[in-house]
Amino acid sequence: MKPEGIRKARRAGRLKGVRINEKEWSFYRSELKRYQSRYNRRLATDERQAA
């Protein structure tokens, strides 16, 4: 997951974050794993086919 993708997901409401200060956000590891498994399924499928 790239930082740009995480920012877009947070802005779209697909990923919940905790605001640290005016510019920085933090994310629980469990929330990142949930997002990855839910929204990046195509990536996991592509990796299996490449192996």
Image (cartoon, rainbow, N blue to C red):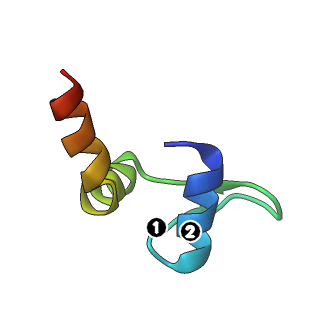
At which x and y percent is residue 45? 19, 44
Please identify the quarter of the rendering in which residue 6 is found: bottom right
Residue appearing at x 83%, y 64% in the figure = 22
Q: Mark 2 highlights which residue?
A: 10
Relative depth, front residue between 21 and 36:
36
Along the horizontal axis of the image, is 14 left or right of 4?
A: left
Residue appearing at x 28%, y 57% in the figure = 34
Instruction: State the CA–CA distance, disc 2 to disc 1.
Output: 5 Å
Relative depth, front residue between 44 and 49:
49
Residue appearing at x 33%, y 52% in the figure = 36
Which type of secondary structure does the marked residue at label 1 adopt? Answer: loop
Q: Which amino acid type corresponds to the residue marked 1 in the rendered image?
A: Leu
Q: Are marks 2 and 1 in contact (CB under 8 Å)?
A: yes
At which x and y percent is residue 49? 17, 32
Residue at the extreme front: 50
Along the horizontal axis of the image, is 51 left or right of 24?
A: left
Q: Mark 1 highlights which residue?
A: 15
Q: Earlier in the sequence, mark 2 or mark 1?
A: 2
Along the horizontal axis of the image, is 45 left or right of 3?
A: left
Residue appearing at x 23%, y 26% in the figure = 50
At which x and y percent is residue 38? 26, 62
Relative depth, front residue between 16 and 14:
14
- Disc 1 packing (10 Å; few <14; some 14–19; many ≥20): some
Question: Which image quarter is the C terminus in?
Answer: top left
Which disc number belongs to residue 27? Answer: none
Which type of secondary structure does the marked residue at label 2 adopt? Answer: helix
- Relative to 11, say whether 39 is above or below: above
Q: Which amino acid type corresponds to the residue marked 2 in the rendered image?
A: Arg
- Disc 2 packing (10 Å; few <14; some 14–19; many ≥20): some
